[in-house]
């Protein structure tokens, strides 16, 4: 297909898109993905295909691919603004049509590609670029200042961490990338932890990151409503289980310059879903055919990854995205990701609409917090 090209053909580039070609490719791909000749793959069968396929060579995915989703219809009414080129508000008919297209894209993408490229979530590209600069500032902090923020000093393991704790213990540089994470405390307390005054351009850091966290929370609620609607369950099925007490987090990842890094270990997120923006193409996502896809986008697109909590509650109708990171090392690369979690005590079991009569669970389901803690311990 024209929107998928082998990595060997050209180096990663900032994304650009042409509206006409986007619509043409979108229509062609929609015809292929939704073809009545293709047998539907759902639930456990879909999950089995997605994780048993043999990974192929990674290919690049341009922003004008079929599931480049315009999320504007979810936000334009509340924000009292239009995200279309001409800036005119849609009629109710147009609004419903755009929303239906969004829901169909979620259904199609979750079954075949495992991720979405999302635009118009009330964040401008320059705002994400500013957050990437904040990630760079954290990476440039002295190691001693980073140690004060080490996740081992925080009960919920928020703060700074290298990949592989041995990197810090041996006094060396992070093995592949380092991260800094903020979240609310237990019971929905204030966000934290926060870096010290040794942070470059520390002025306004807390205010900017805190405001971004709250805006991403609001955007996530609208997106979770759309995902629930795409599944055919109550629009509030997930929102009713999200509050200030949920362990949602905002994480900054920094990849240093140097030799090209091999792909990191493939992973899934314990979250409901994750919103991710990158300064340069870095993330790779596995599709159900075993192909690693590289979204060719920078801060002008947000990558939406489906999480384990969503897979559990939907009984794998939307499987968790399997992803990894790889960089060419030519220049520093920064990622900002917002992981949307349910409330700590929400049980990881199928919603009522997906439960089978007479089917007994193998054991007591984990809660969202237990699932998160299990993944944190495994990572350590």
Image (cartoon, rainbow, N blue to C red):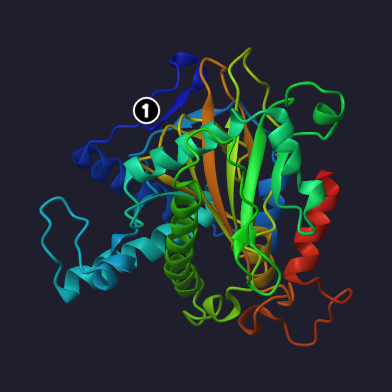
Look at 73% across and 26% down and name the residue there. 174
Look at 74% across and 32% down and name the residue there. 144
Relative to residue 367, is residue 141 depicted above or below? Answer: above
Left or right: residue 240 versus residue 160 is left
> Disc 1 marks which residue?
14
Q: Nearer the viewer, residue 240 or 319?
A: 240
Relative to residue 154, is residue 52 depicted above or below? Answer: above
Q: Nearer the viewer, residue 103 or 173?
A: 173
Q: Number of labelled discs? A: 1
Dot 1, crowdedness within 10 Å: few (<14), some or many (≥20)? some
Left or right: residue 248 versus residue 32 is right
Residue furthest right as drawn: 363
Residue furthest top as drawn: 259
Across and down, in percent, residue 56 comes to 63, 29
Across and down, in percent, residue 367 comes to 77, 72
Q: Can you say which quadrant of the picture contains the C terminus?
A: top right
Q: Can you say which quadrant of the picture contains the N terminus?
A: top left
Look at 60% across and 31% down and name the residue there. 139
Q: Is residue 206 visible?
A: yes
Q: Is residue 37 visible?
A: no
Q: Quadrant of residue 43?
A: bottom right
Q: What secondary structure is marked by label 1? A: loop
Across and down, in percent, residue 366 comes to 81, 71
Residue furthest front as drawn: 197
Across and down, in percent, residue 231 comes to 51, 72
Relative to residue 148, is residue 86 depicted above or below? Answer: below
């Amino acid at each position: 297909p024209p929107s998928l090209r082998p990595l060997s053909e050209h180096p990663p580039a900032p994304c650009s898109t042409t509206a006409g070609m986007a619509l043409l490719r979108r229509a062609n791909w929609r015809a292929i993905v939704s073809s009545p000749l293709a047998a539907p793959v759902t639930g456990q069968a879909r999950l089995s295909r997605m994780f048993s396929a043999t990974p192929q060579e990674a290919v690049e995915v341009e922003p004008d691919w079929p599931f480049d989703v315009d999320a504007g219809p979810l936000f334009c009414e509340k924000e009292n603004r239009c995200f279309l080129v001409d800036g005119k508000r849609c009629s109710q008919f147009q609004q419903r049509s755009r929303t239906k297209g969004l829901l169909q894209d979620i259904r199609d993408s979750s079954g075949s590609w495992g991720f979405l490229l999302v635009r118009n979530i009330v964040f401008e590209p320059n705002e994400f670029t500013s957050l990437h600069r904040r990630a760079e500032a954290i990476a440039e902090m002295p190691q001693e200042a980073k140690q004060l923020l080490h996740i081992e000093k925080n009960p919920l393991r928020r703060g700074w961490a290298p990949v592989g704790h041995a990197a810090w213990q041996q006094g060396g540089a992070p093995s592949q990338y380092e991260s800094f994470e903020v979240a609310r405390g237990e019971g929905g307390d204030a966000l934290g932890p926060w870096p010290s005054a040794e942070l470059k351009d520390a002025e306004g850091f807390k205010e900017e990151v805190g405001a971004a966290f709250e805006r991403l929370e609001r955007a996530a609620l609208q997106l979770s409503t759309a995902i629930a609607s795409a599944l055919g369950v109550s629009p509030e099925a997930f929102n009713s289980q999200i509050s200030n007490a949920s362990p949602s987090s905002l994480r900054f990842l920094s990849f240093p310059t140097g030799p090209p890094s091999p792909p990191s270990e493939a992973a899934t997120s314990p979250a409901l879903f994750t919103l991710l923006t990158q300064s340069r193409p870095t993330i790779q996502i596995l599709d159900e055919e075993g192909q690693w896809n590289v979204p060719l986008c920078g801060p002008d697109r947000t990558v939406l990854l489906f999480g384990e909590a969503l897979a559990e509650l939907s009984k794998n109708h939307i499987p968790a995205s399997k992803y990894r990171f790889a960089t060419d090392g030519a220049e520093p690369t920064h990622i900002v990701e917002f992981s949307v979690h349910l409330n700590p005590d929400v049980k990881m079991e199928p919603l009522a609409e997906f439960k089978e009569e007479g089917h007994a669970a193998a054991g007591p389901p984990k809660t969202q917090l237990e699932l998160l803690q299990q993944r944190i311990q495994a990572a350590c």
